[in-house]
Every structure is written in C-alpha cells, then in structure tokens.
Amino acid sequence: MTDTVPSFRSLSCPVPVAGGPTVTLAHGGGGRMSKALVDRVFLPAFRNDALAVLHDGAILPAPRGRLAFTTDSYVVRPIFFPGGDIGSLAVHGTVNDLAMCGARPLALSVGFLLEEGFPLADLDRVVRSMRDAARAAGVPIVTGDTKVVDRGKGDGVYVNTTGIGEVPDGVDISPLRARLGDRILVSGSIALHGIAILSVREGLAFSTTIESDSAALHGLVADVLAAGGTGVHVLRDPTRGGVSSATNEIAESAGVGMVLDERAIPIREEVRGACEILGLDPLYVANEGKAIAIVAPEVADAVLAAMRAHPLGREAAVIGEVTAGPAGRVTMRSRVGGTRIVDMMSGEQLPRIC
Amino acid sequence: MKHVDEYRDEGAATRLLEAIRRRVTRPWTIMEICGGQTHTLIQAGIDRLLPEAITLVHGPGCPVCVTPVEMIDRAVTLARRPGIVMTSFGDMLRVPGTLGDLFSAKAAGGDVRMVYSPLDALALARRMPDREVVFFAVGFETTAPANAMAVWRAKQEGVRNFTILCSHVLVPPAMEAILSDPDVRVQAFLAAGHVCTVMGYHEYEPIAASHRIPIVVTGFEPVDLLQGIGMAVDALEDGRHGVLNQYRRVVTRAGNVPAQRLLMEVFEVRDRPWRGIGTIPRSGYGLTPAFAGFDAERRFDVTSVHAEESPDCIAGEVLRGRKKPHECAAFGTACTPEHPLGAPMVSAEGACAAYHRYGRRAAEAAT
C-alpha cells in the first residue's frame, strides 16, 4: 500500500497542503496535517542532511574554536515589501548578527508562529524566499518548529531564527574595544529598509523606487576582517533605531564619545526626499544590509577599500571618529557648521503633524 | 536635493552669520513662532552660532503642545468607547492627558489608528460604515484646510459616520497674547512660513503696526532662518517695524485664497483654551452650524470631560517664551521623552523635546 503513496519530498515546488488554502489549527496539532505541512512546504525548501533526519534537533559537527550564538524574531508588516519579505529578512538578520560578532555563520534554526487563516500560498512564498536567502548566504537551515495560534491571536506570521557561527582565531570584535582616534565607517547608504517599509504601509503608500537593503553581510565582514585584521575593533548592524542607536550603544559600552560628520553620511537622494516629506531623521531609520565598523586609524583606508570593493559596500564611507568623551555622547557636525547631540530614539519615530 | 540643499549650504550660512555679527550692536530678543523652526535652529546648532547678543525664544507654534489637556482626555475617552475608531496624526498619539495618552487607550483595547491625512480617515469611514470614525483635528492654519476639506467632502458624499474632534488654533491671536503679556521680552517675531502660505501675511500688518515691531515671515531651512534672523536684526537696528517676507518662494501677501474660502465655509472663529496659556479670545476654529453634524464633541457628548495640568510642568512659561526648557525643574528628570509631563516634551516640534534630543541640557547651557 505504501508503495502507491507519492513521495512529495522529491518535489522542489510544494503542492497545496490538504485541507484548504489557509493555515488551520490542525497544521500545528502535531498530527497528519502538521506532518503534511512539514513534508510539503518546509522540507522541500530547506532540504539538507541535518534537517532530513527529522529528529528532535539537528546534530552538527563542532568547530574547534569559539562559537557565536544569536537569536532574533521577525514581526515586520507588511510581510512582503520592496526588496524582500519577512522570510529573507529573518535569514539576513540572524546571519548579520553572527557576522557582527566576527563569526562565520554555520547553521540556522527557524520557528514559525502562524495564525489560523494565514494563506498557505503566502507561507509558501515566505518559505521559498528563506530557502533562496539561505542558499545565497551558504548557511543551511538545520532545524525548525511550527506553531499555529487561534485566529485573532497572531498577525499572520511571525518568524524566529537562531544562528550559530564560528569565530576564527585572532578575531576579537566587541563594542568595548572602541578607542580614542578610531574611525567610524558605514558600509553604504543608510535608511533604505525603514523607508521601503513605510512606502508600502497602509495609509501611506507612496510611489518610490526605494527598496530595502536587506542582505547577508558575512561576506563583506570577512573582507573587512581580512583587510583590517586586529585593527577592526567593533562591528554593528544599525537595524532598529538606525545609525543613532547603534553609535550611542557602542559609545556607552566603550565609555567613549563620538563625532559624526553629517555631510559624510551616505544617503540617497530619494531617501532624503522621503525623510523630508515624512518628517523623519534618516539617522534613526532602520537598515538591514549595512554594517558600521569602528577601526584603528591605521587600517581605516584598507577597510574602506575592502568595503568598496565588495558589491554590498560600494557606497561605504568614513562618517566619524571616536573621541575621548564625554562618555556615551555622540555629537554631529551639521551641514551648516553647527553641532548637536545625536540622542537615542525615544519610542518610535512619529511622523510629525505639519 | 533641489530646493533643499541650497538652503543648507555652509557657505551661505557662514556669510549670513557674518553679516548678522557685523550688524548687531546691542542685545535683541527674537521669537520664532513655529516649532518646526525651533527644531531646525537646534538641530543645525544655529542658536550656538549666533552672536551672544541675540537671544532666541521659542514660541507657541507647536500644535500638539498647545492642545489643551482636556481635549486629549476627550480623545482618549472617545477612543475607549466601543464602536469608535479614533484617528490622529502620529505625534498626537503620545501626548499625555490626565487619562493617559492615545497609545495607552490603544493598548487597553481601543481602536486607535495613525493616519497621514484627514482624507485617509474619511476613506476609513467609507470602508467601515458600521463604525464611527473620529479624526482628532489639531493644528494651526497649516493643517486646517485639509481638515476642512475632509469635513466638506464627508458632507458632499453623505458620509454620516465621520466626525472631527476639533481643536484648531490660530497664530495671530497668540502673538497678540504674547505681546500683551506685561513680562514680555520679545522684540521681533519670525512668523511661521507655512501658516502664511495658507493665510498670507496681511493679518500680521496691524500687529506689527500697533506694537511697533518687525515680523519676518520665515521658512524652515537653516539658511531661511539665518536670513529671517538677519532681516529682523536689520529692522531692529534701524528702528523699523512692519512685516517682511523672507519666504518669498512660497508665501504671498494674500496667501491661498481658495483654501481660505473653504476655511470660512467650514469653520468659524471661536475662543479657544491653549495648553499652558489659558483661553485666548477668538484664537481657534469650531465647525459652523452648517457642519455641526460633523462635530464629535456634539455627537458623542464628551464636553463633560474636564482636566487640569500637571503642576510640575511649566509648559505655559516655555510656550510664552518666558523660560527655556532646561530652566524647568522637571526637565530631563521627572519629564523625559519616554515619560513626558507636558506636550512640549512629546512632539517632534516641541521645544522641550528639541532641547532634550539635541542635547541642550542645563549643565551644558551654562557653558
């Protein structure tokens, strides 16, 4: 009898799961429907040796040195946006968190929280996008989990990814290592992700060509580390809260000050325009494919050249310098020559009234 | 970026600053009316680049800041009622009343939505005919035409489930109130360019004449502001008064006449309470009898909601230009952007928020 059951695992493009076009509570119930979802949606997309065993966890070879270990949850709305979606973002975000530790990413896990009624076609699209992002990054998704919550108790889909990576010998990246005189670099033009998301939010949809910068940065980081060696002191991806939060956090951790030069910060014209119209400060807008590097002055040129030689770092620039303090204070020299403090954001940036 | 970069040019800014330095012979106090101007001044660091003789005081031109606390309580009360969708501009959501802010009403289960235009709120009402959509209509003459248009269209289209909670205020009566304050120390005004885009500047001419002061209609970019300050200083040094227009690329004396006609049709001038200042005669808008059916206060009977200010907040002193934000005992301690006591700490245009965000702290201000 079993011989007549077709093996869906051999399909690369998943077929609709029995039971209708949307996620039901049964998909998370641990029974037949759950298995069908795994067999027909997740396994074909994420196929790899560790995952195929369908054990309670993945068993992987251990690297010799130090491990980096990180987790992040993704709740972005809308789930599909110009330049990416919640799936690719969940891969890039966690790969980048590992990369910012100076680690070479080894493997990811994925957890899906699905709301009853979520279209399976959308789930399929998210999963295939994760597959493509993981393949492009060369990082396998080796274990996963799915839960379904009652309609009204979730918001379609939430994704969690956890990652482990190997930190090569000699690499010592830490926010505590920012030192007086270090140069502050950013790997490209800022605020693309946040503005791309806003451009498709309900009630705001404006016409723009701005796409999210969502990308896996471990390749760029490897080039930065090769060029700068131990002179690379701090790496940080300026996601939520943007460049202002990232620099403030580092300045506070290291007990140093920072001075940024407004004119040196790369911002595309269309992003500046959108920020002007919306009353947002691009320094506070999220990025998902940019790295801030704080490096010793003697390697700054080499690191900048390495960034610019990488496809994701062509617009890289030196945007400031680490100063003696006051500790934790980031200031910026404005376009007209004044100075101001760049503070952490309070709550969310709210579009202003007029 | 065209139309922006030329007004943020360091060379132009430096030349204007030099001219101001050469011209100033004694101390002058100038008030910029608009909160948007306050933010540019502080963000670009212009207040620190100007000669010491020039003192800038920050005016009441932040619509969020001057909305009375009881209007916020009425909005929060409405937002908590089942069947009501409360819509508002973003920075109004975090302004605390005595019953909390609109964000907390949302967290407690109220349907509160941020919109970018009152017309979006009207569209929401069309889409949700079984719900009552209320738009929190705050702001100066700048936002009034769009809000008037939403009400006007709702009437044309027969949309019955749309109302506005109206808290509109007007600039000239506030300037009169500041100038008639016996403690007033303002010697010249930078008038708010965008308000004048709508209303023109002829209504400032009697104020300039009767108080014998210069009023300079000014834009919002660093170079605009430096030019506006320079024109004010020139007039002060020469002993001239009258209305001058720095923002000529946008503002005309007559303003936007079709917008003014719409305002006259939908709104009538009324006495309005201002947060921290008190009631100013004929200083705001209410709906005319023809549009009274779109008044949320009438439809939902929230006029019984009354509230008093926090006694620790000196927003009124700040909004009248008597005190700087960091001269408040609560500034940066009991009152922060995370836990604001008063509206000027909330809005992107609030003077206290500008001081806090761009680091004009008490200790630093002393240096």
Image (cartoon, rainbow, N blue to C red):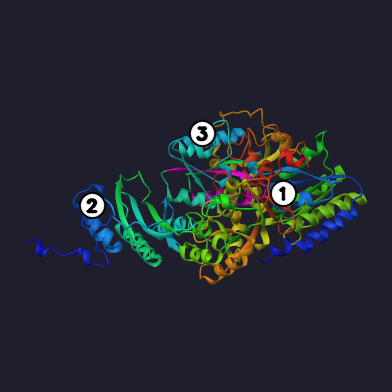
Callout 3 and callout 2 share a chain: no
Magenta-span inclusion, residue B147: yes
In this view of the protein, which residue sits in the foreground, A339 or B318?
Answer: A339
Circle 2 crowding by C-alpha within 10 Å: few under 14, some 14–19, many from 20: many
Q: CA distance from mark 3 to mark 1?
A: 35 Å
Callout 3 and callout 1 share a chain: yes
The residue where tag 2 is placed is A34
- Name, please, the residue furthest toward the left: A1
The amino acid marked with disc number 1 is Ile
Q: Secondary structure at mark 2?
A: helix
Percent from the top left, x then y, of residue A227?
Answer: 55, 67
The residue where tag 1 is placed is B42
Subunit under mark 2: A
Q: CA distance from mark 1 to mark 2?
A: 57 Å
> Which residue appears at 76% of the width and 60% of the height?
B248
Percent from the top left, x then y, of residue A42?
Answer: 28, 59
